[in-house]
Image (cartoon, rainbow, N blue to C red):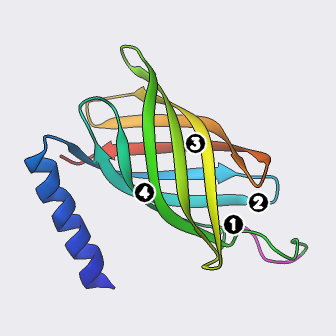
Amino acid sequence: MKAKVTLSILLSVLFSYAFAQQLFVGSYVENTCINAKLGTRIGLLTNQGFEVGGFYQSAKIFQSEENKPLFYEKEFFGVFMAAPLLVRDHYQLKLNVRTGAVNKINFAITPSIVMDYKLFNQVSLNGGIGVKALKPTLQAGIRINIL
């Protein structure tokens, strides 16, 4: 597993130099109607503002499994894509779509609208709203451009 992660990071760095894209990492919290989830993501940011990459989020660290519905999301991982809708000086409004496996059993597609605010050249804060299982979610996070 460590070899796959190392290889994927190395390939991302090589593609970043080859295609003039920036490699970034990010962390986010997503609050759903059942519980909060902590996630991490890694991807490429193009010069036009498009993002593509992979993510992993889990609910294990926030709450116990008591008083939960029969089926709820314990982990969610897969790929994401974000496309800019509105671009201003330090602000960007993006359409973000995450696609992946829920609890290694089901497949899910979760759209959201995210606003990025650029603090510094390499650091951006983001927040947004989305839909998961036909219920609204709130998101907040940070993105750090590595290259």
Which of the 4 image quarters holds residue 73?
A: bottom right
Residue, disc 2: 35
User: Could you say whether the residue bearing mark 4 is in a helix, strand or loop?
Assistant: strand
Q: Residue at x 82, y 53 (%)?
A: 33
User: In the image shown, does 100 or 123 lie closer to the viewer?
Assistant: 100
User: Could you say whether the residue bearing mark 1 is in a helix, strand or loop?
Assistant: loop
For the record, the magenta segment spans: 62-66
From what the image shows, is residue 98 above or below residue 121? below
Which of the 4 image quarters holds residue 130?
A: top right
**CB under 8 Å between discs 1 and 3:** no
Residue, disc 3: 140
Q: Label 2, label 1: how many angstroms apart (C-alpha)?
A: 8 Å
**CB under 8 Å between discs 1 and 4:** no
Q: Amino acid at mark 2?
A: Asn
**CB under 8 Å between discs 2 and 1:** yes
Q: Amino acid at mark 1?
A: Phe
Badge 2 or badge 1: first in the primary sequence: 2
In-image side of 56 versus 1 (left or right): right
Can residue 56 be seen at all in this image of the molecule?
no
Q: Position of residue 70 (x, y in %)?
A: 87, 77
User: Could you say whether the residue bearing mark 2 is in a helix, strand or loop?
Assistant: loop
Q: Label 3, label 4: how many angstroms apart (C-alpha)?
A: 13 Å
Determine which of the numbered discs, if any, sits on residue 41 in the image.
4
Can residue 138 be seen at all in this image of the molecule?
yes
User: Could you say whether the residue bearing mark 3 is in a helix, strand or loop?
Assistant: strand
Residue, disc 1: 62
Q: Label 3, label 2: how many angstroms apart (C-alpha)?
A: 14 Å
